Image: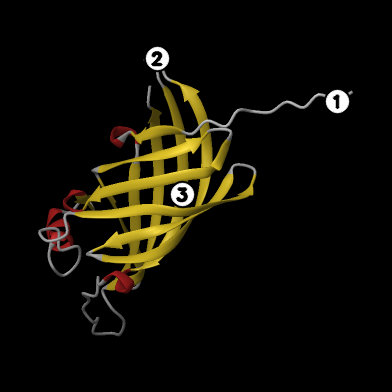
Amino acid sequence: MSTQVHKTSITTRWNIDPVHSEVGFSVKHMMVSNVRGRFNEVTGYIDFDENDPSTAKIDVEINTNSVDTRQEQRDTHLRSADFFDAENHPKMSFVSTKVEHVKGDNYRVTGDLTIRGTTKPITLDATFEGVSPDPYGGVRSGFSATGKINRHDFGLNYNAAIEAGGVVVGADIKIQLEVEAIKEA
């Protein structure tokens, strides 16, 4: 006689901890190097069953005014109508539409990214980093993800030609995410 053990499926809300999460990016500059930056203000949640992360529903908002490349003149330009147009589009968002298990703790997360009022589907390669109790009586989970978008798809079209050929800002934006979330009580 065999006995089967069934794990109970319970979907829980996990709120993104903005202090321990990072939304980073890099873009080719002057055709020879990469400029890295981040957004300092991210909020949102992940609804998922820790026994089956492929059931996750993700909803994230990022304050475009919080862009930080460690150079204030460049950050001011990125906030302008040439790029994020933060005055008219103070938030960008990501809402998942599908999470696929790949292997082990690796997943493929597809969702709708909205920047400057334009929404396009993107896919991120994600890793579920695990769940751990924190020293304050709470429970935390971790995720990392990478992906790539073409900035022109979202109306981020500003550029300048380089005299020797090429452009100042590349089209491809690499995305790097480190997310820590706190389980709701």
Callout 1: few (<14), some (14-19), or many (20+) C-alpha neighbours within 10 Å?
few
Q: Position of residue 120 (x, y in %)?
A: 36, 66
Quarter placement of the N terminus: top right
Residue 71 is left or right of residue 9, and the answer is left
From the top left corner, tell me how far across and down residue 101 is, in percent: 60, 49
Using the image as rendered, state which of residue 130 and residue 89 is in the foreground: 89
Is residue 71 found left or right of 14 in the rendered image? left
Contact, mark 3 vs mark 1 (Cβ under 8 Å): no
Q: Nearer the viewer, residue 126 or 30?
A: 126
Return the x and y of residue 88 as percentages of the image width and height: 12, 61
Is 13 left, or right, of 165 in this rendering? right
> Disc 2 and disc 3: Cα gap in Å?
27 Å
| Camera-nearest label, 2 or 1 | 1
| Pointer 2 or 1: first along the chain | 1
Q: Residue at x 10, y 58 (%)?
A: 87
Element under disc 2: loop
**What's under tag 1, amino acid-wise?**
Ser
Amino acid type at image mark 3: Ala
Q: Return the disc, 3 or 1, that comes first in the chain's sequence.
A: 1
Nearest the camera: 96 or 27?
96
Percent position of residue 116, x then y: 22, 64
Tell me the mark number nearer the camera, choosing from 2 and 3: 2
The label shown at residue 2 is: 1
Q: Rounded to the nearest whole Å, what is the CA distance between mark 2 and mark 1?
A: 38 Å
Q: Amino acid at mark 2?
A: Gly
Q: CA distance from mark 3 to mark 1?
A: 40 Å
Give the residue at mark 2.
137
Residue of label 3: 145
